[in-house]
């Protein structure tokens, strides 16, 4: 089923606050094999110029994946989730996410397209501190493959 | 480590190639760390039911492995300011005691204003290209 062009620009209420913990950053860094001490040693992070341990560049997915579910839960977004694959991903960082950040994610539908029977939905999740400092944006393009 | 200087980089500079083995245990660990528990990344039955040849790696896991080539080269994980990939073929991770692999090569494609460089990545698994338009913008010292 084709997605309605009127969905473009639709924005959803901000997520609950996600508090970034040192332990979660260390766990994520270990899972991707990132050995740099700035992910797990606050002194090393400070020596590199950061206020606390910093997250790897793709860590934001931990909160943006969850935040973007608000789109799939929208009854006006008729995307067959069982046929969805991740088509593209972009991260734009204003600064690294760091331990102690209290982050809020706001999701916007950036584009909808239909190509060759496949529906493509692009969402952008803007991540900021609860005080309003922009931290990063994560843009995801999902493809719902048409029934063959 | 300290951040790489723009003086040490030119268009055409090659990043050290890396080969990452990927096992089922790696995928389970990544599922837990990221919160993406889609069973196609750990359950053979579900993966084959949806038409895949077998369990595949999370695209985001492959994207994260490729980022390490850039951040290790740059000397600072905070140097990667923009990062984009398009997911192409999946990375198959068989449960055969060996698993799958991801090979990452990178090359400086352009020097940008503000002491930044664009790195273009070539990411393959068993010879197949698994990411395309994989590009990172790195802020240099």
Image (spheres, coloured by chain):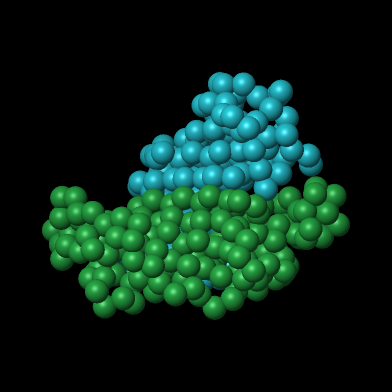
Q: Is residue B118 above or below residue B39?
A: above
Taking the image as shown, residue A49 lies to the left or right of residue B77, namely: right
Visible in this render: residue B126?
Answer: no
Residue under the point 52% across and 68% down: A105
Taking the image as shown, residue A129 lies to the left or right of residue A13, namely: right
Visible in this render: residue B112?
Answer: yes
Residue under the point 67% across and 64% down: A25
Which x, y percent locates residue A36? 73, 50
Tell me the quadrant of the picture where the C terminus of chain A can be found.
Answer: bottom left
Q: Which chain is green?
A: A
Given residues B8 and A75, the one toward you in this image is A75
Which x, y percent locates residue B105? 53, 34
Which x, y percent locates residue A32? 60, 56
The part of the image, by quadrant, that contains residue B48 is bottom left
Taking the image as shown, residue A148 lies to the left or right of residue A7, namely: left
Taking the image as shown, residue A20 lies to the left or right of residue B37, namely: right
Q: Colour of chain B?
A: cyan
Q: Is residue B125 above or below residue B7?
A: below
Given residues A51 and B105, the one toward you in this image is A51
Residue under the point 33% across and 61% down: A9
Q: Is residue A64 above or below residue B13?
A: below
Residue under the point 47% across and 45% down: B84
């Amino acid at each position: 089923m084709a997605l309605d062009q009127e969905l473009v620009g639709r924005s959803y209420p901000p997520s609950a606050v996600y508090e970034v913990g040192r332990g979660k950053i260390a766990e994520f860094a270990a899972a991707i094999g990132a050995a740099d001490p700035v992910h797990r040693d606050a002194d090393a992070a400070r020596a590199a110029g950061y206020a606390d341990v910093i997250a790897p560049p793709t860590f934001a997915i931990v909160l943006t994946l969850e935040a973007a579910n608000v789109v799939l839960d929208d009854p006006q977004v008729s995307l067959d989730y069982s046929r969805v694959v991740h088509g593209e991903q972009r991260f734009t960082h204003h600064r690294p996410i760091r331990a102690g950040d209290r982050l809020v994610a706001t999701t916007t539908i950036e584009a909808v397209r239909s190509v060759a029977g496949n529906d493509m939905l692009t969402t952008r999740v803007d991540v900021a501190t609860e005080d309003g400092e922009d931290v990063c944006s994560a843009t995801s393009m999902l493809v719902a493959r048409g029934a063959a | 480590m300290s951040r790489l200087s723009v003086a040490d980089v030119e268009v055409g500079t090659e990043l050290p190639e890396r080969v990452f083995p990927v096992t089922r245990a790696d995928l389970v660990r990544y599922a837990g760390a990221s919160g993406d528990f889609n069973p196609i990344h750990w359950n053979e039955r579900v993966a084959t039911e949806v038409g895949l040849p077998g369990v595949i790696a999370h695209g985001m896991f492959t994207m994260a492995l490729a980022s390490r080539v850039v951040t290790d080269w740059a000397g600072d994980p905070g140097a990667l300011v923009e990062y984009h990939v398009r997911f192409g073929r999946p990375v198959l991770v068989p449960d055969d005691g060996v698993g799958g692999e991801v090979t990452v090569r990178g090359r400086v494609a352009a020097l940008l204003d503000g002491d930044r460089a664009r790195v273009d990545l070539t990411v393959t698994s068993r010879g197949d290209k698994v990411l395309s338009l994989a590009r990172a913008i790195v802020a240099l010292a």
